[in-house]
Image (tube, rainbow, N blue to C red):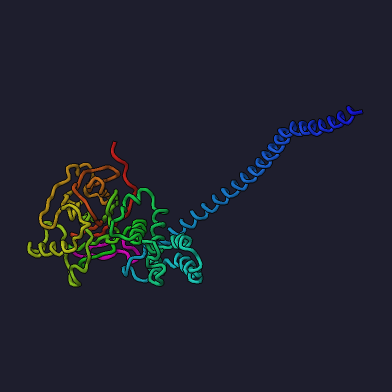
Amino acid sequence: MSNAPRQSKANDAARPAHEDTSLVSKQPLLKLVRSEERISSLESENRDLASALEALKEKNRALEDENLNLRSENERLRTIQVRIPDNQCGSKRANDLNGGDDLVKKFKMIVSFMNLSLFDDDLVVSALSFLGSDDLVSLAKTSKRFGLPHGNDQMSLVERAACRAFMVSASQEEAAKLPKYADESHLELLRQLEIGRAEMGFDLLIGDSIQYEDPLTTSRVRSVHPESIAVCRRNVMRAGKHFVQFSQKTSCFDVGVIRPIDRRQFGSCISRIVPMPAGGTDLSSEEIAHMHVTLMSAKSDRWKGTVHCASYFHLTSEAEWTDWETHGRKVMENSQDFDRFGHIFGLLLDLDAGTLSLFANGNNIGLIKDGLAGEYCWFVCSWSDEGSCRITKETMPLPDD
């Protein structure tokens, strides 16, 4: 009798021990099942995320395409605006361009109704980067928030917008032509980019003997009497390579590069100007020297080297250069390789190499002058009672083999 309870207790004690052992043996299997379920769930989530990512990528591509189209349209409108010379071509030219101006006005009207104070600075900068430099200047004058630095920013919102616009839209070649000066604003740099993209034109006329041949464009001038100049003053070249073509009805013009000058240096009574101490003028040496002193009064830190003016006279195939104290002259050695009475030829200013070269029919005829450095503008000087000259930007000629 005494053994029965003991056996029962032993069985009772053994039963839970046996059940615990069975549960322990199932735990790895349960863990495995849970892990597989978790992996399946994660894989499903990963597929959903991948699908969402692809959708976002597609949306981003669409937005980038839309942004590119908007910037292209904006650049077109900027070009239309820059083409209008300052007080040179009258109102008819501006009226002819009203179609493009209407789109700009609509954009400005939309912006005028927006309360930009509700948006953070980064979003405002992105929106403003679609404006041209003239519009950004106007905006900077309307509010301190746009025109002055605030907080920890070293640049105003307008400056940041101009910087962004330049970085996004400037090609590698354009950026190489416009290295930023330390004392230059991003707004001014953007304006130079816009000017460089516009039609080339003579926006500065000095002297009584040179006029626009067509009142609707500044790219062509005609000579009435000798000794006046036309300068592409707004298009200042500071670095890189620049190629233009000159088309003349008669070969009566010096063509080349000159330092950035200003009509205000000469006052309002200047009737004749000779940037080169060339022969064939009835001006006295004292008068020419006085002109050159006046020209030198515009000198700035951006003038490098001593070649302040270099030109080519097509009729005699002569190259000239001067520092407005001394001058040099030579006949182009390879001038016999093309017809000097031909009226279309090109000039290449390479400020990386410091050279000005003559081209005809795509061929490099020869070096006009080396040692050029700093800032220059294209110019022509009339030497006849009649004739006309046109300047156009052309594709850079291929290098010689």
Q: Nearer the viewer, residue 201 or 248?
A: 201
Left or right for 284, reference 115: left
Q: Residue furthest right?
A: 1
Q: Nearer the viewer, residue 21 or 295?
A: 21
Find out whether residue 142 is within the magenta segment.
Answer: no
Left or right for 52, reference 20: left
Residue 151 image offset from top left, x and y in percent: 40, 64
Picture residue at 54% right of the left edge, 54% below the top: 63
Q: Residue furthest front?
A: 2
Picture residue at 50% right of the left edge, 65% below the top: 119
Asked if residue 94 shows in the view, the reply is no
Picture residue at 61% right of the left edge, 44% below the top: 50
Prevalent SS, magenta region: loop
Q: Nearer the viewer, residue 37 or 340?
A: 37
Left or right for 221, reference 288: right
Q: Which quarter shows the N terminus?
A: top right
Left or right for 348, reference 121: left
Residue 388 image offset from top left, x and y in percent: 26, 59
Q: Nearer the viewer, residue 194 or 156?
A: 156
Q: Quadrant of residue 207?
A: bottom left
Find out whether residue 211 is within the magenta segment.
Answer: yes
Q: Quadrant of residue 267?
A: bottom left
Residue 359 image offset from top left, x and y in percent: 26, 46
Asked if residue 268 shows in the view, the reply is yes
Picture residue at 10% right of the left edge, 54% below the top: 326
Residue 8 image offset from top left, x and y in percent: 87, 31
Range drawn in magenta: 209-226
Q: Which quarter shows the C terminus?
A: top left
